[in-house]
Amino acid sequence: MKRAFTMIELVFVIVVIGILATIAIPKFSATRDDATLTKAKTTLASLRSALSQEVQRRQMQGIYTAVTNLGGSTTAGSYIFDYFDGNSNNERVLEYPPKSCKNSSATGCWKKTGNNTYDYILPAAVGGKATISVQNNRIDCSPASKCKYLER
């Protein structure tokens, strides 16, 4: 006599796998958004550190002009946070600068919106944007935006 699975046992296993999948898939989606936000937090921390180092480097050279922007272009898909004050003769802001949003509907990316302002477009699950600006050798997050998602 051969031993095999009955049809009821197979259906039961398929139902259990389906239930587990309905629980696991939303968790994986949330994990991806968390990872995207963590990457943005890390980028912001790196920007603050790089700005501080640039200010100190300039002061050691006797240059007391304030850093006005972190470089980048408003063009979609171009590098952002590449050179201080947009001058390629200066030190790089980040060794490997991220690219700006590819299009207006992209999420989880940075976008330059003005000479000294940048937006981080939050993932779709959160929605909205966080606006940072470079002023007086500091990077400040606009209180009107959703900065709480980028602060540690």
Image (cartoon, grey):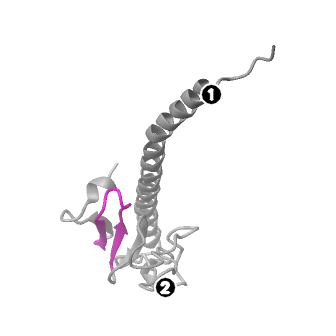
Tell me which segment is drawn in magenta: 116-136
Which numbered dot is residue 7? 1
Question: Nearest the camera: 108 or 112?
Answer: 108
Q: Label 2 sits on what residue type?
A: Asn
Does residue 93 lie above or below 32 as drawn?
below
Badge 2 local density, few (<14 within 10 Å), some, or many (20+)?
Answer: some
Which numbered dot is residue 87? 2
Q: Label 1 sits on what residue type?
A: Met
Does residue 1 lie above or below 129 as drawn?
above
Question: Nearest the camera: 68 or 116?
Answer: 116
Tell me the quadrant of the picture where the N terminus can be found. top right
Q: In the image, 60: left or right of 133? A: right
Residue farthest to the top?
1
Residue at point 52% right, 68% down?
A: 94
x and y percent of residue 113 in the render? 33, 80
Which numbered dot is residue 147? none
Q: Dot 1 lies on which element?
A: helix
